[in-house]
Image (cartoon, rainbow, N blue to C red):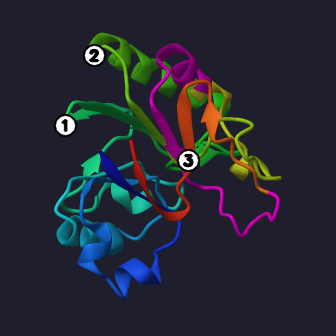
């Protein structure tokens, strides 16, 4: 299945110079957050495939004004074309309480609830988050550190694909994301990527 992965920055190539031929065969679009509502709605209209998303820490409006025609994954598991896709939005914060900013303990509780859904539904194929798992290209400040609790899902269910955003490639020249974590293909979706699984 061909997937379009997007996160954190709106691509001029997609938004200003959209070429339908470049996205032929895309069966689903997955957003890892921090993208304008209008951009997600544009993608949902222009690409004949469902768009699944988790909110980023800058998507506070999504809690009361979500992007139209898009499927939220935050704390949920959805099934599409035989794939089970689940997700968690937001980032780490030293001052939790703001929308989509969490302490490790808060995210641990959210991950635990999602894990129960995954177990009940027989596993997960794709795990989508805004922030990465701890150690998968962390930044220097607390807002750009990953969550240890995400390993509960990665270790227990071994999804085929783990995709996240939040870690901008232009923040750090030596930002390294592992290509695999065990059997799980790991992708930092910053900007956009087209992959086949």
Q: What's the CA distance linking mark 2 and mark 3?
A: 24 Å
Reading the image, the residue beneath label 3 is 187
- The front one of 93 and 87 is 87
Q: What's the residue at 45%, 83% (across, down)?
A: 12
Q: Quadrant of residue 175?
A: bottom right
**Other-residue count near label 2 (Cα within 10 Å), few / some / many at <14 / 14–19 / ≥20:** few
Q: What's the CA distance linking mark 3 and mark 1?
A: 21 Å
Q: Are marks 1 and 2 in contact (CB under 8 Å)?
A: no
**Other-residue count near label 3 (Cα within 10 Å), few / some / many at <14 / 14–19 / ≥20:** many
Q: What's the residue at 48%, 18% (across, down)?
A: 112
Rendered view: 169 above or below 86: below
* Image x and y of residue 31, in percent: 40, 55
**Other-residue count near label 1 (Cα within 10 Å), few / some / many at <14 / 14–19 / ≥20:** few
Q: Is residue 163 magenta?
A: yes
Position of the C terminus, as image quadrant, is: top left
* Magenta part of the chain: 151-174
Left or right: 125 with respect to 99? left
Q: What's the CA distance linking mark 1 and mark 2?
A: 15 Å
Left or right: 144 with respect to 1? right
Left or right: 163 with respect to 66? right
Q: Which mark is residue 121?
A: 2
Reading the image, the residue beneath label 1 is 81
Q: What's the residue at 38%, 40% (across, down)?
A: 74
Q: Is residue 94 magenta?
A: no
Please name which of the two marks, 2 or 3, marks the residue nearer to the observer: 3
- The front one of 48 and 113 is 48
The kind of secondary structure element at disc 3 is strand
The kind of secondary structure element at disc 1 is loop
Position of the N terminus, as image quadrant, is: top left
């Amino acid at each position: 299945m061909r997937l379009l992965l997007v996160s954190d920055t709106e691509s001029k190539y997609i938004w200003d110079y959209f070429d339908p031929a470049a996205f032929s065969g895309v069966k689903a679009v997955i957003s890892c957050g921090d993208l304008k509502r209008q951009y997600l709605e544009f993608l949902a209209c222009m690409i004949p495939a469902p768009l699944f998303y988790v909110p980023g820490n800058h998507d506070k409006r999504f809690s009361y004004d979500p992007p139209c025609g898009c499927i939220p994954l935050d704390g949920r598991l959805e099934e599409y074309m035989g794939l089970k896709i689940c997700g968690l939005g937001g980032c780490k914060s030293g001052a939790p309480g703001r929308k989509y900013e969490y302490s490790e303990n808060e995210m641990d509780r959210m991950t635990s609830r999602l894990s129960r859904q995954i177990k009940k539904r027989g596993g997960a194929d794709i795990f989508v988050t805004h922030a990465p798992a701890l150690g998968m290209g962390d930044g220097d400040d607390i807002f750009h550190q990953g969550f240890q609790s995400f390993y509960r899902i990665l270790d227990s269910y071994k999804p085929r694909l783990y995709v996240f955003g939040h870690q901008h490639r232009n923040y750090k020249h030596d930002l390294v994301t592992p290509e695999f974590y065990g059997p799980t293909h790991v992708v930092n979706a910053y900007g956009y990527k087209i992959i086949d699984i």
